[in-house]
Image (spheres, helix red, strand yellow):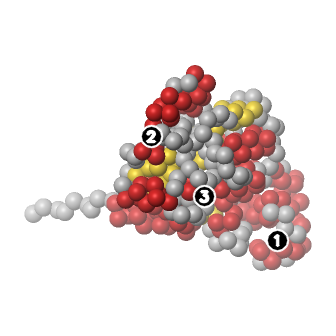
């Protein structure tokens, strides 16, 4: 149910005060209301139990544009961050919103698949601590030896820590030096069992990566600049769980992908609830590829990106049939 206008301001005040830690006078300035009103709304929020912030994610669904994106691309739920005073930079709001959305989606007993990258780690860092029962968080791809905090094992274990859950990492590299070695490692019983178990997940959290010199697969050493140039020439546009995808969302046929230890795309699509989070504007083309590949059912992004998606969708709609004489 959409929030009533009278409730929206209460949720906005609670979101800024409890999630972002703003002072009451800062909340008042951000929402252009009096400090007394802020105090009143926060009291209402406490009385209504909104202080947990979970229901405040409705703020980001209460938008006709979100409904249009859902309809245009066949998604279950879309959350949008817009220029409405909740953040100076909507993109900076994405991790906090995604963390709250993700916590709402995790149920007791769930098996949760987690990918990696800067966005995923930012979500983990923004996530409140929750005591979920019987939850297991599993890594969707192999690991990296880089010192970056957003490598696969770090993302998996930090999210598991926030959920008081069990974490399962891949004890294998993300990318091997040869196709033969990767193939043999995937056949090892422990690795084979982990890869097979991904399709039994109930929920997945991931983003889509870019293919440029600042991409995490490049920064972390998984992909060299020479390989990057060759893959882009072959039609690679984005990255899902470390693997390169083409514009149609299919796994790109290339040596790099054949040397990967990562979830099979059919296994990812078999997960019933899949949350994609997109923060940066430069991920527009990779996001389109992920849509074409049917990689996600739920989406968190900025309203600016949603507008671009709808503009693109309008160019793909068939023209109405002309009347014949």
Residue at 35% from the left image edge and 65% from the top image edge: 315
**For residue 183, which numbered disc appears in the image?**
none
Distance of label 3 from label 2 (alpha carbons): 20 Å
**For residue 258, which numbered disc appears in the image?**
2
Residue 305 % position (x, y): 53, 65
Please indicate whether residue 70 sits to the left or right of residue 11 in the image. left
Do labels 1 and 3 touch, CB within 8 Å?
Answer: no
Distance of label 1 from label 2 (alpha carbons): 51 Å
Residue 159 at least partly seen: no
Which tag, 1 or 2, sits closer to the chain's start? 1
Residue at 43% from the left image edge and 60% from the top image edge: 229
Q: Mark 1 sits on what residue? A: 27
Residue 10 % position (x, y): 78, 62
Residue 207 % position (x, y): 58, 52
Mark whose residue sits in front, 1 or 3 = 3
Which tag, 1 or 3, sits closer to the chain's start? 1
Please indicate whether residue 164 sits to the left or right of residue 296 in the image. right
Q: Mark 3 sits on what residue? A: 219
């Amino acid at each position: 149910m959409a929030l009533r206008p009278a409730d929206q301001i209460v949720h906005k005040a609670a979101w800024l005060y409890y999630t972002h830690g703003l002072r009451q006078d800062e909340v008042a300035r951000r929402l252009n209301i009096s400090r007394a009103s802020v105090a009143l709304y926060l009291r209402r929020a406490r009385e209504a139990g909104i202080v947990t912030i979970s229901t405040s994610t409705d703020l980001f669904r209460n938008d006709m544009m979100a409904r249009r994106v859902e309809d245009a691309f066949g998604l279950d739920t879309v959350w949008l961050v817009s220029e409405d005073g909740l953040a100076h930079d909507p993109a900076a709001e994405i991790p906090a919103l995604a963390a709250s959305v993700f916590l709402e989606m995790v149920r007791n007993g769930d098996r949760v698949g987690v990918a990696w990258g800067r966005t995923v780690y930012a979500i983990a860092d923004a996530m409140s601590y929750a005591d979920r029962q019987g939850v297991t968080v599993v890594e969707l791809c192999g690991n990296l030896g880089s010192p970056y905090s957003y490598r696969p094992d770090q993302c998996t274990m930090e999210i598991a820590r926030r959920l008081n859950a069990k974490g399962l990492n891949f004890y294998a590299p993300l990318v091997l030096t040869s196709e033969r070695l990767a193939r043999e490692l995937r056949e090892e019983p422990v690795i084979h069992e982990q890869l097979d178990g991904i399709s039994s997940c109930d929920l997945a959290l991931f983003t889509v990566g870019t293919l440029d010199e600042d991409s995490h697969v490049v920064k972390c050493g998984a992909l060299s600049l020479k390989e990057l140039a060759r893959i882009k020439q072959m039609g690679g546009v984005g990255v899902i769980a470390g693997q390169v995808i083409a514009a149609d969302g299919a796994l790109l046929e290339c040596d790099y992908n054949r040397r990967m230890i990562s979830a099979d795309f059919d296994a990812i699509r078999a997960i019933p609830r899949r949350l994609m989070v997109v923060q940066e504007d430069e991920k527009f083309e990779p996001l389109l590829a992920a849509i074409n590949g049917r990689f996600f059912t739920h989406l968190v992004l900025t309203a600016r990106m949603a507008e671009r998606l709808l503009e693109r969708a309008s160019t793909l709609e068939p023209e109405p049939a002309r009347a014949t004489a």
